[in-house]
Every structure is written in C-alpha cells, then in structure tokens.
C-alpha cells in the first residue's frame, strides 16, 4: 500500500467503492486522514463499513462542511454529460475533487529521497493498445531483472501496490477519465499510443477527449515523452513537446518510416527500427513474435521499446522481452488451433478502430461481432472487411449492426454460443475465427472480460462436441 500524505487529521470523502475506491480509502486512512465514504450500492457500503469506514450521504445539505477533498472513482462522471450529484455538491462547496492517480503522484516521493536510485514511473495512455503496451513494458523490465509493478487500469489499484524498491519502476495504464481529473500527474516517462473516437459523451467530443489525454504531458512535464504520430493529434502533441528537431526528450513512434535527426522508433512491414540522430541504432524482426500479431501490436512494441530505452535498457534486453511476451487475455489472444483453423479472442476490441486493427491482422476471417454500438457508425471498418469471409452478429442490436457491414455476408446469431457454433461448423483450414466485437459488451455481459470468457467457453465446447 502507498499511504496518502498531506491529509493527516483532515476529513476526506471517497465516492465509489469498487477496487480503486476502497484502495484509496485504505491508503488515505493509512496516511492519517479521517475517511468517509459513499456508494449508491448498499452491498458496497456494507463492505466498506465492515472495514470500519463511516458511510455518509454526500448529497444532503451540509455534507461537505468539514470535508477537505473528494476522491472519486474513474467510472463516475465528473463533468460531461453531467456531473454526478455528489461531485456537483463538492464543486458547489468549493471542495477539490481528485482521484487515486492524483493521490498516488501526490504521495510518491518524499519517502524515497534517501534512495541513490529513486523509483521511476511510466504512464501509458491512448485510445487503443495502452493495456498491451503497459503489460509489455512491465514484462520486458521484469525479464531484464528490474523490479516492476503494473497498476492503474490494469493490474492492481495504484494505491494498492507495494512501496517501490530502490531503482524500481511503476508502470501505469491510465484512461482519459483518470488523466482528466487527477490533480497531480508527474511520471518520469509518459506514453501516448494513438487517438481514435471513444468515450465522446464523457468528454463532450474529440477535442475534450484529446485534451484529457494531453494532460498527462502538460501537468508535470515528463522527462521523456513517447508519442505515437500516426494521427494528427500525435503529430501536434510531439511538436508541442519538442524543443527542436534533434531534441531527445520526445521519441516519436509510428507504423510507417520516420526520418530526420530526432529519435524515432517505427515498425514497417514487420520490422522494428530505432533511429537516433540520423542513424539506425537497432532493429528487430517482429513477424515471428507470436504474442504481438498485426501492425497495431507492432505499434505497441515500438512504444514499449521506446519507453524501456528511456529507462536505460539495451536493445538485446528489450528484444528478449518482446520474444517471450505471451500477450494479454482478450487482446488478440490465440486460444486454440484445430484442423488448420485458428481461434482468436479480441474481446477488448470494443470500438471500431480497435476492431479494424484486429481485422487487418488476419486473413480469411470468420468474424464474431456486435453488441452495444458506439457513436460514429461502422464505416471505419471498411478497410478491413476484405479479410472477412463471413460475419456472425451477436447482441441486442444485431440486425442494425449487420446492416452497417455493407456487402459482407452476415448472419444474425444473437448470442455467443450460437455464433461460435455456426462459425466452427463453417470454418475451413486456413480460416481464423475471430471475436472482435467493435461494440460495447453491456447488452449481454458485465464487461468485455466476461464476453471473452464466454467466447473461449463456446469455442472449447464446440471443438469438444
């Protein structure tokens, strides 16, 4: 646990008592704060009360009279489409609102001043690939013998980790919800993977979404910035952060060749290359790295490579970590091969852009897709549809989803079990049965993990039957 400093004797409220909320309450108490909590769910409040926390109805008049700060969980709206009533009350009372990420950066530092090698923090954000990139950085560091901890949107809650060891690294995956609200953001290395439309209702459009991501680089000024420049926003951000064409503070990454006197890591036709000051200093063939299939994963490899180079690792150490990386569950996860047919679970492909990357990573696809559609429609999938032999559509909006697939042959299956059974029965050697929904899961599943688990179970049942 990382005890939260700066609130000794003060009353701090915690809103939302899931994993991060409870961890924040414990860490605040460990740092000497008097903690009051609230969650709309009775069972969540009861769990907190069982640990000795006081539940307080934070919407009643006067609830914030003695409160110094409100700490909220990332899933609770704090600005758009409208602030949660508790957050609105705090703002009206002039009470600062923060989250566990802000508390972490606020509390990390003083106790490590005696270290000859203080711990460092790598923070990863972006629309797609941030989970894989974060896990890959952590894996490479661990394989190289470094003490690394993975937290934030992946792994443990950020305040739930062990106090970092001397010379250790904390790798954080951060969502736009977290970067937008955190009152302190001071990583040593900050990574921006890419940007595509997502969570637009929470940020009032693309401009607000990009601004939320950009805060990771603007608030504390990371020592090293790793920026994906495949999109205009990344190019703009890299330009703002750079102090000149040969500046080493910014490492640009891309899925096409980059040139110039700066520091670049790019992947082209399956080969990763690192260039610095006009010359190539390293290269790796990524085509046979089983845990990182497709151009989108090659971009993740570039980001992880750049981050690890920033931390002082050598090319051979990083290459060894890339080759031993098995991938993450629900992200281009190869789960089975039978009769020449491969089965791939990419349930994390919850938006059009991430699903497109999955479609472009494979050929001869039997595609299981559908769910709760997001804003913007399905036109963005068009460049990958030539790889699809047939779509098997699930979800409450299956018919509408199928209509958006143009000329692709689509069968309305409704549920996962039927879709998988049909795809398995029709698959031929050389085909890939791919779950890449391009939609949210909440119409049929609690989350994308449950959806991926249902896919795996259905595949196992169909192959066994």
Image (spheres, helix red, strand yellow):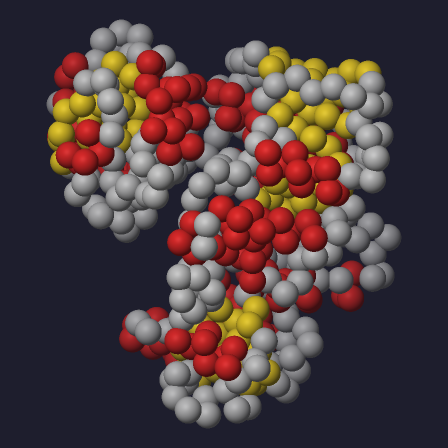
Q: Nearer the viewer, residue 352 or 349?
A: 352
Tell me the quadrant of the picture where the C terminus can be found. Answer: top left
Q: Can the viewer see residue 136 in this picture?
A: no
Q: Can the viewer see residue 427 in this picture?
A: yes
- Does 100 sit above or below residue 392? below
- Does 12 sit above or below residue 65? above
Left or right position of 434 against 62 = left
- Measuring 84% from the left and 30% from the top, which residue is drawn there? 246
Q: Nearer the viewer, residue 251 or 24?
A: 251
- Measuring 59% from the left and 28% from the top, which residue is drawn there? 230
Whole-percent x, y for residue 143 in the image? 64, 32
Tally of marks: 0
Q: Nearer the viewer, residue 179 or 331?
A: 179
Furthest residue in direction top, as rendered: 429
Left or right position of 188 against 464 = right
- Measuring 18% from the left and 40% from the top, which residue is drawn there? 397
- Measuring 53% from the left and 18% from the top, which residue is drawn there? 289
- Does 264 sit above or below residue 211? above
Whole-percent x, y for residue 290 in the image? 49, 19
Tell me the quadrant of the picture where the N terminus can be found. Answer: bottom right
Whole-percent x, y for residue 212 in the image? 56, 53
Q: Nearer the viewer, residue 91 or 272?
A: 91
Whole-percent x, y for residue 7 in the image? 65, 79
Res 303 → quadrant = top right
Res 256 → quadrant = top right
Left or right position of 198 against 341 = right
């Amino acid at each position: 646990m990382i005890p939260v400093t700066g609130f000794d004797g003060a009353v701090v409220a915690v809103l939302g008592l899931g994993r991060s909320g409870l961890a924040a309450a414990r860490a605040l108490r460990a740092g000497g704060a008097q903690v009051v909590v609230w969650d709309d769910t009775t069972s969540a409040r009861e769990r907190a009360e069982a640990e000795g926390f006081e539940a307080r109805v934070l919407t009643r008049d006067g609830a914030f009279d003695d409160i110094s700060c409100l700490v909220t969980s990332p899933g609770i709206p704090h600005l758009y489409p409208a602030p949660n009533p508790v957050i609105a009350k705090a703002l009206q009372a002039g009470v600062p609102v923060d989250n566990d990420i802000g508390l972490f950066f606020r509390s990390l530092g003083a106790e490590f001043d005696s270290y000859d090698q203080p711990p460092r923090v790598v923070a990863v954000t972006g629309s797609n690939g941030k989970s894989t990139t974060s896990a890959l950085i952590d894996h490479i560091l661990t394989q190289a013998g470094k003490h690394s901890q993975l937290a934030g949107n992946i792994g443990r809650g950020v305040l739930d980790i062990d106090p970092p060891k001397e010379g250790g690294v904390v790798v954080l995956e951060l969502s736009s919800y977290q970067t937008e609200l955190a009152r302190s953001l001071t990583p040593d290395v900050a990574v921006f993977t890419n940007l595509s439309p997502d969570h637009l209702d929470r940020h009032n459009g693309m401009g607000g979404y990009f601004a939320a991501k950009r805060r990771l680089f603007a608030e504390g000024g990371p020592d090293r910035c790793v920026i994906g420049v495949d999109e205009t926003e990344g190019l703009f951000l890299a330009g703002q952060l750079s102090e000149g064409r040969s500046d080493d503070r910014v490492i640009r990454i891309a899925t096409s060749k980059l040139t110039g006197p700066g520091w670049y890591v790019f992947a082209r036709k399956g080969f990763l290359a690192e260039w610095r000051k006009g010359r190539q200093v390293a290269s790796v063939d990524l085509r046979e790295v089983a845990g990182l299939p497709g151009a989108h994963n090659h971009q993740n490899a570039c980001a992880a490579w750049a981050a690890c180079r920033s931390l002082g690792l050598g090319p051979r150490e990083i290459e060894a970590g890339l080759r031993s990386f098995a991938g993450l569950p629900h992200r281009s996860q190869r789960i089975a091969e039978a009769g020449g047919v491969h089965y791939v679970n990419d349930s994390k492909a919850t938006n059009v852009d991430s699903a497109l990357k999955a479609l472009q990573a494979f050929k001869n696809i039997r595609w299981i897709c559908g769910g709760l559609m997001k804003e913007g429609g399905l036109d963005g999938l068009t460049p990958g549809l030539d790889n699809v032999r047939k779509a098997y559509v699930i979800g409450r909006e299956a018919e509408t989803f199928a209509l958006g697939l143009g000329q692709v042959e689509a069968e309305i299956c409704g549920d996962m079990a039927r879709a998988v059974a049909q795809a398995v029965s029709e698959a031929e050697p050389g085909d890939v049965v791919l779950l890449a929904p391009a939609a949210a899961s909440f119409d049929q599943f609690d989350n994308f993990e449950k959806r991926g688990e249902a896919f795996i179970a259905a595949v196992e049942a169909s192959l066994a039957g």
